[in-house]
């Protein structure tokens, strides 16, 4: 994985299902404990727990959505 990222959009707050602008790679920051749910048209793909103050990047299909039990900040990125 690269040490550099390219920001491809504006960071948004997410709680309900969102494609984050159809992003293929998403950086997520969780200011508080949150459980993320990843889904597609067939249903839930999986879940991921983020502890307060953590950040993680996720690869997803453009139509996959992310929802969270508490507001998380998401932005589309690419690795450089």
Image: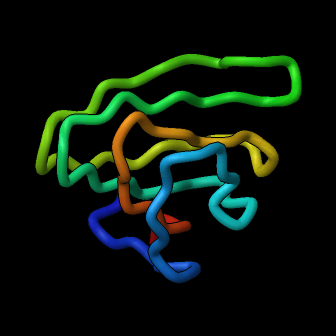
Q: Residue at 33% across / 72% down in the picture?
A: 4
Q: Which residue, as the protein is rendered here, is positioned at the far right?
A: 41
Residue 1 % position (x, y)? 37, 50
Query: Left of 27 or right of it: where is 38?
Result: right
Q: Residue at 19% across / 54% down in the picture?
A: 31
- Does residue 69 lie above or below 70 as drawn? above
Query: Left of 46 or right of it: where is 35?
Result: left
- Does residue 68 lie above or below 53 as drawn? above
Residue 72 % position (x, y)? 36, 53
Residue 3 % position (x, y)? 27, 65
- Does residue 21 lie above or below 68 as drawn? below
Camera-nearest residue between 3 and 21? 21
Q: Residue at 87% across / 28% down in the picture?
A: 41
Q: Quadrant of the C terminus?
A: bottom left
Q: Residue at 55% across / 67% down in the picture?
A: 76
The image quadrant that residue 42 belongs to is top right
């Amino acid at each position: 994985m690269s040490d550099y990222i390219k920001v491809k959009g504006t960071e948004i707050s997410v709680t309900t299902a969102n494609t984050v602008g159809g992003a293929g790679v998403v950086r997520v920051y969780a200011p508080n404990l949150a459980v993320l749910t990843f889904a597609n048209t067939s249903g839930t793909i999986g879940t991921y727990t983020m502890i307060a103050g953590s950040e993680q990047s996720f690869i997803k299909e453009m139509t996959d959505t992310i929802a969270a039990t508490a507001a998380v900040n998401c932005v589309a990125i690419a690795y450089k």
